[in-house]
Amino acid sequence: MPKTLTARGSSRADGPSPGGDALPWTRNDALVTVGAAVVDLLSFSLGSQVDHGYVPPAGCVLLVVAALPLLVRRRAPLAALAAVLLLDLVFNLSVPVGQHFTATAVVALYTVARSRGAAVVAVAALVSAVMPLVGQSSQPGTVDVIGSVANPLFVLVTAAAMNRWHRENEANRRLLADRAVADERRRIARELHDIVAHHITTMQLMAGGARANLASDPEVAREALVTLEGSGRMALREMRQLLDVLRAGDEAEEEPTAPQPGVGDLAGIVGETCRAGLPVELDVRGEERPLPPSVGLTVFRIVQEALTNARKYAGEARASVRLTYGPHGLAVEVSDDGAGAAAAPAGSGYGLVGMRERVALHGGTLEAGPLAGGGFRVAARLPLKAGEGALR
């Protein structure tokens, strides 16, 4: 399954750093504040130089101070907008300047429009449209009502478009998450097929063996029935565990579950297959060492499914299981010398799909196909990361 990684020690651009000494603003807020102040300073300096031949220092100071409330715009958007508009009013009344709508006011109004309801946004936009007109009535011909309304309206339209885009993006994200959950449940359903098919096949063969030996060899029949009972119990337990995962919204049963099988259980499944009528040889090479549980479970399921298919389709044959421990990974190979794929009915293949998925989850490779001289071979290679499967 895909893992969610949490980076540690990285700078947090979208939220305050943890700890009691954290600043009330983020790095992005600081960059936006500086950017808005620079834009306003450049616009004011160029305009004043053209209109008056000089740049009033008081105006530059007021523009910088007016941008400071943007540092807390995420935590207190309305208060930040009110402070910006108030400082802009002081700027209008203190400095000879034409009608304008500062970049600082654009950012503050945009933040309110993104985070508040329609009624609050409408009042904020109205105040933002009226405020630039204050102080301009003494200058005939300088009042532009249309321009004063158009600027806040443009900000509102932009914010509304961004809100809609954000909602659609969030809906798509949830849809992708739901699809990922559905894909995972289908994968678990295929695993259910692999597990239960193995046990049901074993139960069928054991029942047939017990019936054939019931009169001539009661002891063999008794052992077959004991194996049949164990396989049935294990099949029911594993089916219940997987159905607990598949049930959406239901609480899982509180009954403790058995540990997942691993490489240590290969001898048991090989012996079970031999008793079912298919001779199997288990060959372990290299230095045995403990493996991650997920890798051990993957190896077990590959051998289980391959031997189940061999019992179904190989006919009168022999099979071999080879497990090889390498310095950087693990290889498992299951082969038989029977009919193999030629006897498999059309449409079967969920087992191979399940094997490929399990191997792919570990970054390994899988080869499966008929042998030139007859029979079928399944071979998988599973890499081990540094520190995994180390010697005790």
Image (cartoon, rainbow, N blue to C red):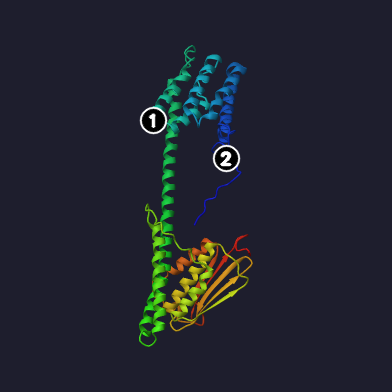
Q: Residues within 10 Å of mark 1 (few under 14, many from 20)?
A: few
Q: Which quarter of the figure has residue 66?
A: top right
Q: Residues within 10 Å of mark 2 (few under 14, many from 20)?
A: few
Would you place residue 182 above or below residue 226 in this image? above
Q: Say left or right for 41 vs 154.
A: right
The disc labelled 2 sits on which kind of residue?
A: Arg
Residue at left offset 48%, top offset 29%: 77
Q: Nearer the viewer, residue 47 or 383?
A: 383
Which image quadrant: the C terminus?
bottom right
Residue 185: which numbered mark, if any? Answer: none
Would you place residue 191 above or below residue 321 in this image? above
Residue farthest toward the top in the current orientation of the protein = 138
Q: How many marks?
A: 2
Q: In this rendering, does residue 56 appear at all?
A: no
Q: Position of residue 270 (x, y in %)?
A: 49, 76
* Comparing labels 2 and 1, the label whose residue is closer to the camera: 2
Residue at left offset 63%, top offset 70%: 287
Q: Nearer the viewer, residue 213 or 65?
A: 213
The disc labelled 1 sits on which kind of residue?
A: Ala
Q: Nearer the viewer, residue 326 or 81?
A: 326
Residue annotated with mark 2? 12
Residue annotated with mark 1? 118
Q: Position of residue 252 (x, y in %)?
A: 39, 56
Q: Which quarter of the figure has residue 185?
A: bottom left
**Contact (CB < 8 A) between labels 2 and 1?**
no
Looking at the image, is mark 2 or mark 1 earlier in the sequence? 2
Q: Helix or strand or loop: what does disc 2 sit on?
A: loop
Q: Position of residue 259 (x, y in %)?
A: 48, 63
